[in-house]
Image (cartoon, rainbow, N blue to C red):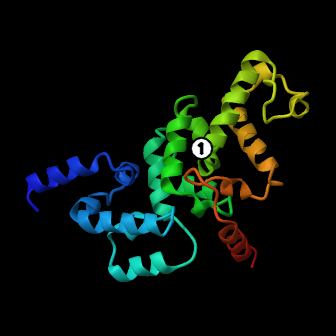
């Protein structure tokens, strides 16, 4: 492939959401080499309403892709999500392995789409240091809108000492907290606490919304059955 063709393809793909999310992946140039196949597969994935896929699904053999597209459920590749997070967080001792060690504590960690993880990283970096995000790494698995709502509420609580009226948080939950002394680490821990509290700390908080819509109840039920067995 000549340099002009490579540059043309890069220019075409730079605004593609899937390419942006995977841009830090060492294998991203496979998306350039296999551009037509990759774009065709993205169309099929969208038609099948699958939200979790890996770079390998976009560029691998037809046999691998057909097995993925015709199978039940959604899973991302652990290496893809680790690379995405590590390339976004620039602090000492953050490695693929250390990130995966944190994420694996959540039993549904492979069922959050890469673009959701990426959007959460972009959101969190506006208000929190990379180290704080890393310390609370599981937060990137949860719905973006819900995380943002709780962050806004808790940051206002730290600043003003009061939970806004008609908020999703009960004042009684924080009666004994010295709000002004809440650290950024504690803010993100409380965000996770508030999201999971509604689901009895089962991990089901990630199913609430994926890509702006609710996951199908049948899929949710079957996935939970799989993990329970």
Q: Is residue 98 left or right of residue 166?
A: left
Q: Position of residue 192 (x, y in %)?
A: 72, 44
Q: Nearer the viewer, residue 47 or 156?
A: 47
User: Is 81 drawn above or below residue 34 in the view shown?
Assistant: above
Q: Is residue 92 visible?
A: no
The image quadrant that residue 129 belongs to is: top right
User: Is 72 drawn above or below residue 101 in the view shown?
Assistant: below
Which residue position is annotated with label 1? Answer: 144
Residue appearing at x 37%, y 65% in the figure: 43
Q: Nearer the viewer, residue 213 or 71?
A: 213
Residue appearing at x 77%, y 42% in the figure: 194
Q: Position of residue 16 (x, y in %)?
A: 33, 50
The image quadrant that residue 60 belongs to is: bottom left
Q: Secondary structure at mark 1?
A: helix
Residue appearing at x 31%, y 63% in the figure: 39
Q: Residue furthest top?
A: 160
Q: Is residue 7 left or right of residue 51?
A: left
């Amino acid at each position: 492939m000549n340099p002009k063709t490579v540059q043309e393809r890069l220019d075409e793909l730079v605004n593609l959401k899937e390419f942006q999310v995977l841009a830090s992946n060492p294998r991203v140039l496979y998306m350039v080499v296999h551009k037509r196949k990759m774009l065709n597969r993205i169309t099929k994935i969208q038609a099948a309403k699958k939200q979790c896929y890996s770079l390998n699904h976009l560029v691998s053999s037809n046999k691998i892709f057909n097995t993925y597209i015709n199978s039940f459920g959604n899973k991302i590749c652990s290496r893809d999500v680790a690379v995405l997070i590590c390339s976004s967080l620039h602090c000492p001792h953050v490695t693929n392995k250390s990130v995966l060690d944190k994420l694996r504590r959540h039993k549904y960690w492979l069922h959050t789409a890469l673009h959701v993880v990426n959007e959460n990283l972009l959101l969190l970096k506006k208000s929190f240091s990379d180290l704080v995000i890393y310390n609370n790494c599981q937060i990137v698995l949860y719905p973006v809108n819900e995380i943002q709502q709780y962050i806004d509420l808790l940051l206002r609580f730290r600043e003003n000492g009061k939970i806004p009226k008609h908020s999703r948080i009960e004042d009684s939950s924080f009666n004994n907290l010295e709000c002004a002394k809440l650290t950024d680490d504690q803010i993100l821990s409380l965000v996770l606490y508030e999201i999971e509290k509604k689901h009895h700390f089962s991990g089901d908080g990630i199913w609430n919304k994926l890509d702006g819509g609710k996951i199908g109840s049948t899929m949710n039920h079957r996935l939970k059955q799989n993990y329970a067995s």
